[in-house]
Image: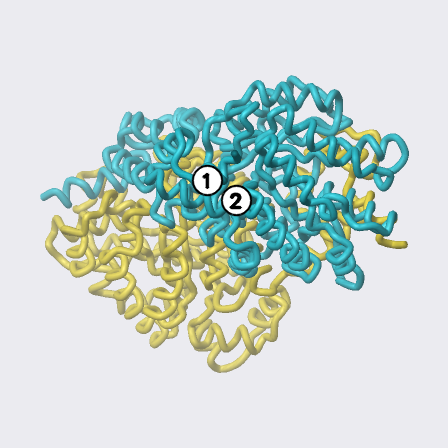
Chain colours: A yellow, B cyan
Amino acid sequence: MSIMFRARAGPSEEIERAAVSEGVDPELIRRLIACGRAVMPCNPIHSPEPCVIGEGLTVKINANVGTSRDQPDMGMELEKARIAVRYGADTIMDLSTGGDVDAIRRAILKEVQIPVGTVPIYQEGLRAARRSAVVDMKEDDMFSGIEKHAKDGVDFMTVHCGITRESVSRLHNSGRLTDVVSRGGAFLTAWILHNQQENPLYENFDYLLEMAQKYEFAISLGDGLRPGCVADATDRAQVQELIVLGELVKRCREAGVQSMVEGPGHVPLSQIEANVQLEKRLCDNAPFYVLGPLVTDIAPGYDHIVGAIGGALAAYHGADFLCYVTPAEHLSLPTVDDVKEGVMASKIAAHAADLARGRGVDRDDRMAKARKKLDWEAMFRESLDPQKAREFRKRGVTAENEGCSMCGDVCAIRMVQKYLEK
Amino acid sequence: MSIMFRARAGPSEEIERAAVSEGVDPELIRRLIACGRAVMPCNPIHSPEPCVIGEGLTVKINANVGTSRDQPDMGMELEKARIAVRYGADTIMDLSTGGDVDAIRRAILKEVQIPVGTVPIYQEGLRAARRSAVVDMKEDDMFSGIEKHAKDGVDFMTVHCGITRESVSRLHNSGRLTDVVSRGGAFLTAWILHNQQENPLYENFDYLLEMAQKYEFAISLGDGLRPGCVADATDRAQVQELIVLGELVKRCREAGVQSMVEGPGHVPLSQIEANVQLEKRLCDNAPFYVLGPLVTDIAPGYDHIVGAIGGALAAYHGADFLCYVTPAEHLSLPTVDDVKEGVMASKIAAHAADLARGRGVDRDDRMAKARKKLDWEAMFRESLDPQKAREFRKRGVTAENEGCSMCGDVCAIRMVQKYLEK
């Protein structure tokens, strides 16, 4: 029986554990999973620590790792996965497209105890592309690729089932500046246009559901037509795909398969709230998993900051799951350092949203009290990155142990204290 | 005749120039300055390039530089000012408190052609503190300090006139975790509490207005009681001070003195819009100059990202002027690199807000088109930091010139193009 069906029947040990780490009533988690407003990606073969993503829970973050043809080193990607976990990623997605992709996926699954996601179509699309052309992908290969990942223990998979003849048709005369920027989306859009056939992942969605039931993986409904620049945000093609995804969410729930919905991408600040509301309404409050969103296109090298701005606002308005963006986005595969910076930026965005919705306030309060007492060890303890905080402080030499080199002897906190206490 | 009075009389050459760089009708700028909804800080002794800050205009950013007792090197601060200008700061504030503060201020005024601001009370407060105690500051010294800065050509000055016996009284039993964190605010709060007298800058505000008229500097009404942590945001003490500042804005306008209002500080995402609306309402739409705001307290070492999240949202809701925050905030005086990172983060926030309000869209569109064409030189040209973008791309070796090392041979853009064009 699937996680979702089990949740409908009653509480479980995993739900109890998730409730403890979330600090909420297990009954709340059970109800959310049962109705599909939250997911707990957990393939029994991998069996990660319970992590629940969804309505009203703390915002979770995902870090992507993975090789490319030009950088196929497995060791590097494992190191990125370790760093991401260390700095607070809640899940890892392996997007490898270079080297021995099967071996890398298995190594990552072995390495990390948090849920692992993949995009199986990459592997099949690549094989076809390197053999002849991506449009030569065979339907059987698409499904057997998914089954292979499921058997390896992958906890959630992105499947681009919303790329249909109908949604692709909306691309024509849409005035988009960047067409399709999702890789999986591009594979399937090309496939549909070339073969003049419906997307097999949509056409045979029931087969996908059977596999998800059999192996117990969560389905992350990919947004293959997500905008690739702020000018393309929230256009007819994007919303058309979202409508299809909403229908698929319903079918997932009927089949007892956990599902979430992926979202943009590139969105101006003014459209973020609307994007969250649209997803929540069109997809019956399925967990919303956003990439960024990026609120401007002109800051390559700083896209982790651009994504943190969009992510914080999206999460504040109800997005449940943020996919990190590294400083290398749009430019190159990230380094280990980039991965750390990306995780930190995303973590900050998630926490800022939690805080604004009344979650996690205690830690900020402890930091504030430590600051008032000029208790540096306590400040480091409450810091998201104690090591960096320590380094910055050490850099600025001061004559006193108390203050910092910013104010030196004119520390506002110290100055006012004695007069206020009178 | 002051800039404000002149604007009421008719257009000027500075207004024409500001309108060109802003891309709006000079008549709009003239009306905004005339009624006080925008300021153009411009001391004729310094005579910087016209920069107009206010309602509906592009969001401007300020970078703080300045020595401290522990790091009194003037050369370093001049280098920071140059870097800040190079990466797009619209104004520079010199907050020096170490070394030959007069010489540093004059050197910075000579160095940069954009408006320069200061906080004169620092110098007088420091002198008193180092002599005996900050509470021994003399009223005459406070005003003569301001006059000295004015004579040097300082274009705008932060004056903490809203710290009054009334607003300070609101601190008691307020439940604040961090009391007073503004340095100028701390000086004056301590002074009021110790001397049991009214703040001379408030008591003799007319004298300040006379000076501002005589020398033509803009008044930036400091928020001495701004919250020092998210838990303290938007509390009675902060709002009490803002009410006083609103009354002072009115007096500035009657005297033909340009004024803007400073704001927090530390504010959770959920209170940012309300903070902007409060300022705009209580202060009759005076330009709002916010520091950050920081949306969480637990990310020292990453406060430029924390401030970019808050700043973007504040500016989207109507804040006009963002004071940058560097990664060193709360830990040490920033390095030159920190200054650059702070300026970039703030610039991204300002631009994201502009974009969401329909300004500066062309550049993002050009970037999107360059991305679709995989035209890397054009992408670098549209980047806020072309050098960093180049370095990131160079780092990821690819077999082709076209794509990047993220996708290698499976570039979504390239893949879908040929099928869409059919």
Query: In the image, residue B72 lies at what x, y percent?
Result: 73, 22
Quarter-of-image position of residue B274: bottom right
Q: Residue at the location (78% across, 59% down)?
A: B169
Please name the residue shown 54% across and 73% down the image: A29
Q: Say which amino acid is labelled 2.
A: Ala
Q: Position of residue A107 (x, y in %)?
A: 48, 45
Between discs 2 and 1, the one toward the N terminus: 2
Q: Name the image quarter holding residue B283.
A: bottom right
Checking the image for residue B308, the label placed there is 2
**Residue corresponding to mark 1:** B348
Image quadrant of residue B337? top right
User: Measured from the top left, where is residue B315 in percent x and y?
Assistant: 48, 48
| A88 relative to A271 in the view: left or right | right
Tell whether A406 sits left or right of A245: right
Element class at badge 2 = helix
Badge 1 sits on which subunit?
B
Per the image, label 1 sits on a secondary structure element best described as: helix
